[in-house]
Image (cartoon, coloured by chain):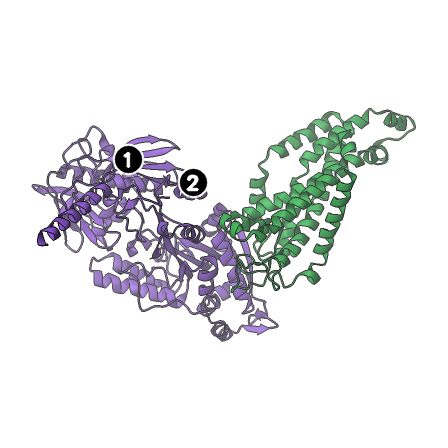
Chain colours: A green, B purple
Amino acid sequence: MSRARNFARGFLALVFAASLFAAWLAPVSYEVQFREAPNAAPSAAHPLGTDELGRDLLSRILYGSQVSLWLAPAAALIATLLAAVIGGVAGWLGGWWERLALAATDLSLSLPWLFLLLTVRAILPLNVPAWSSVLITFALLGVLGWSQAARVLCAGARSLRHSEFVLHARASGAFGARLFFRQILPNLKPVLAAQFLISIPIFILTEANLGMLGLGVAEPLPSWGNLLRSLESGPHIVQNPWRLAPLVLLVLVVSSFQLLLPREEFAS
Amino acid sequence: MRFVRHVLAVVVLLAVCCGSAAAQSGGELRLFLRSDPKTFNALLAGDDASETVGYLTGGRLIRFDRQTQELKPELASSWKALENGKRIRFKLRENVKFSDGTPFTPEDVKYSMQVLMDPKNESPHADSFRSGPGDVTVEVTGKNEVTVTFPAIVASLERQFDVVAMLSSRSPQKELAALGPFFLAEHKAGNYVLLKRNPYYWKKDGAGRQLPYLDSVRFDIAQNRDLELLRFRRGEIHLINSLDAENFDRLQQENASWVREVGVSFDVDFAWFNLSEASPVAGPKKLWFASRNFRRAVSEAINRNDICRVVYNRHASPAVGPVSPANHFWFNKKLTAHPYDPQSSLRLLQQDGFQLRDGSLYDKGGNAVEFSLITNAGNRARERMAAMIQQDLAKVGIKLNVVTLDTPSVIERITQSRDYEMCLFGFVNVDVDPMGQMNIWPSNGPMHAWNPGQKSPATPWEAELDSLMRAQASTNDAKARKAAFDRVQQIVWEQVPFIYLVHKNTMVAVSPALRNAAPVTLRPQTYWNIEYLALTPAAGQP
């Protein structure tokens, strides 16, 4: 198991590094359309071939990794922090606070998030640069994706509320925020880490889902989501199997994140 | 020797006859329908599914031949338009019966027109006949003769009757009694619609055999195009009315005899700038968009040939204007598509004071030229087109932000809030006649998309469009109408309120088991001649 985790760590480090140095590694700009060579097979000029508009696929995957790999963790961080505040505080305080927070969580979980995202995207200003639209998309994912984690954190904080060390801390005069930040939050760290790691692949896949609907990251910026859209056409995949590269990468990255989950802590 | 030759000739003749009889031995035609029909009353059909069923079940007095694009007599053996199209007299075919055996009489024509024009029924076809204040009257003017009088001239009057299905005033089956080649036998909501041969159908083939050849037509109701393709390849359905370029190529590679590319379709993809008074677009952008030079420059900066080649894999043609070259009569043959010429585009922009500096275009006031283009998400071809337009415009220094929105949001923006700058959309043209575009060109029209619902025309050329559309609508003189509509097309070509991009080709799939199929560009592309379609077991049948 530890070998698999080490492999996952190494693989993720490699992919993160490749995305970080995309500007140096990419053979050409991700947006240049070589219209004479749409759907081209791998060659020296285009090591992973081209997409349906003749854009270099390797360059698009590298730049797309920048979008998906760096912003998905950012969105996961936003979601986990929100969950920590809402779920953790509610579980810690208990009573009406907990009921209120759980009701808000249930409400949030019951919302059709896809339609919510569509609605929010529809009311945003139109003239935003591609990068801003990416940031907005992932910020929305982060802001809307806290509820599942909040439930787990609420349960964790509730169990800590009645634990012996908290009683000892109270007895020694620790109350309020000091008790929460010094005693509760540090003990929620494993759960927070697990929730953070779980959220990353979820947000990567969510962006991919939005991309499959044509609603994710705006053209010409690539993301794993809009790269996966080319897989909609079955015949092209059979004829051009290298077009599966973004999907293979996505599966490997999501699997790697799953392998990194602190299973023992999470199970307890 | 001569005897042997005669015997051989007889044998060959017998073989052909037997083959022909085999080719016309009935069977069930199977195809897909995207949704359940909303009505089985062919006179009130407005949605695609209802119109499809209505086309096969409804009998018409006059039929617009989808192949020749000319009018053909059907239930009316002859007709005459009177008073420049204010009145029309039909001589009805004799001994015609509905599918339940009820005779077809002039009273049925009267009844059908009453149902059509009754505002309570909200027939989508009635407005074409509401030419002025007053009622439509129908008189039985002789044995098997009916005269219909309208309050004012109805443009393209005879052509309008192509959509008027005849109902029975006396049949106990009411609107389900059919005069078309088939009648409705079964409908299981969400599952299938089954039509069976009308035993009383009036039409016969050249050999005197009663039509239609097919016993039944079964529509399986499903939206999934991949499933449709799969079932065609398995031989479970016989026709696909509309294929995209990708699936066409795929089927062609599998078996070239399965697919047919009929030619340029009536559908067109186009873009336009928001010039609406009610639009929140303000400042320099409003001035850019209002300039004919700017619109023309954008049009000339777009490489239509590349769109045809890359997006549609060569199964498309650059668009000239609102009318497709497939529309034989109404297309203005003097016009050609705006050429792809970035240099000419820059010259036009310079005439308006724009300057290209460091790869970016600036207007007279020093504002960088940047605007957004909205289009509907999920339409892969249109999204690709938007990405190509983005790169083309970048070559003349224009920064285009492509925004894909869900279709209801796009519709809301272009029709309600008018909060957009440029829009890329498509027009599925189902009407050959300019009357079908009366909601587009007049300045007060709701589909006058760049600036809809104007109280008075905002520009002299829109005023001219108004008068030309009025002129063509107020006469039945084909030459005068053609001249007026040619001028409409020319104004649109010059002023570029819409930037027409491409017409995709009509591509269909037809099973080799189906005989007499002659696909056309007009709907319904593959089974417009349903009476003559016949099934034979064929080798290599998909």
Q: Residue under mark 2: which chain is it in?
A: B
Residue at mark 2: B223
Q: Is residue A120 visible?
A: no
* The N terminus of chain A, quarter of image: top right
Q: Residue at x 57, y 70 (%)?
A: B362
Report x, y in % for residue B231: 41, 40
Q: Nearer the viewer, residue B265 or A9?
A: A9
From mark 2 to mark 1, how far is it between C-alphas? 20 Å
**Both on one chain, marks 2 and 1?**
yes
Q: Nearer the viewer, residue A251 or A223?
A: A251
* Residue found at the very far front of the displayed protein: B1
Report x, y in % for residue B355: 56, 74
Q: Which mark is residue B195?
A: 1
What residue type is disc 2 on? Answer: Gln
| Lateral position of residue B135 relative to residue B190, left or right | left
Say if B425 sits above or below A183 in the image: below
In what element is the residue under mark 1?
Answer: strand
